[in-house]
Image: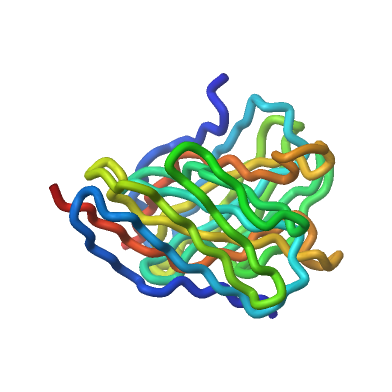
Amino acid sequence: NAGVTQTPKFQVLKTGQSMTLQCAQDMNHNSMYWYRQDPGMGLRLIYYSASEGTTDKGEVPNGYNVSRLNKREFSLRLESAAPSQTSVYFCASSDPTRPGASYNEQFFGPGTRLTVL
Amino acid sequence: KQEVTQIPAALSVPEGENLVLNCSFTDSAIYNLQWFRQDPGKGLTSLLLIQSSQREQTSGRLNASLDKSSGRSTLYIAASQPGDSATYLCAVRGMTTDSWGKLQFGAGTQVVVTP
């Protein structure tokens, strides 16, 4: 099991460029999430997908769009990158419907380090 | 709005000492609380998850307690080792429909264990 995978690992963009961050999980989880991590601020939720076919805004959605392509894949798109979007982006997945001790335990990918110049 | 705080922001201890990491949250209506470890330049690794009905969870040298009524959780790491050096984050999942499935994170405590 690879768990949660993300591509690319690093990316440098110029202001105004667009790009898509890819995320995939092989744990058959229903829910997937995109977070950003900035120094001293912890992780903040950008968008999430409770199940295939649904997406909802998190705490900081402005400037981003998402697509839940299928149960495995959840992508994050920056249409017109800005320097304020320089951050580390993490994808996570969980299965809130699974009973037991691991109920809604979230599993994270390795992150994408994005710099916008 | 739920706020999660971790104090101190950084901590340095000599090898062998027990580590005590604190996490506080403002809204006691939580579903569960999760502790993570993050190594520099890496993703998050889940350490322990405590359900709201539980008082503590243990895994090896790690023990996490939860006092929901006072809005506190503590992560204990016994007999610290240099390999325990990392940033430790706590996150809570709220119980309301609006907070469904979503985690609210603290900013983390950066730990250095010196040989």
Check the image and report above or below for B46 versus A85: above
Check the image and report above or below for B3 versus A26: below
Residue B78 placement, left or right of A42: left
Q: Is residue A21 visible?
A: no
Check the image and report above or below for A83 versus A108: below
**Which corner quadrant of the image does residue A45 belong to?**
bottom right
Q: Is residue B79 visible?
A: yes
Q: Position of residue A59 (x, y in %)?
A: 64, 69
**Which corner quadrant of the image does residue A53 belong to?**
top right
Q: Farthest left residue? A: B115
Query: Which residue is pictured at 30% across the width and 58% down the height?
Result: B111
Residue B106 placement, left or right of B50: left
Q: Farthest top residue? A: A1
How has the structure been colored for display?
A: rainbow
Pick the front one: B71 or A62 = B71
Pick the front one: B32 or A47 = B32
Query: Which residue is pictured at 81% across the width and 64% down the height?
Result: B95
Check the image and report above or below for B51 versus A31: below
Q: Position of residue B46 (x, y in %)?
A: 53, 43
Query: Which residue is pictured at 67% across the width and 50% down the height?
Result: A66
Query: Which residue is pictured at 26% across the width and 44% down the height?
Result: B81
Residue B112 placement, left or right of A70: left
Quadrant location of the C terminus of chain A in the rendered image: bottom left
Q: Position of residue B65 (x, y in %)?
A: 58, 58
Q: Tag count in the figure?
A: 0
Q: Position of residue A81 (x, y in %)?
A: 46, 61
Quadrant location of the N terminus of chain A in the rendered image: top right
Residue A30 placement, left or right of A22: right
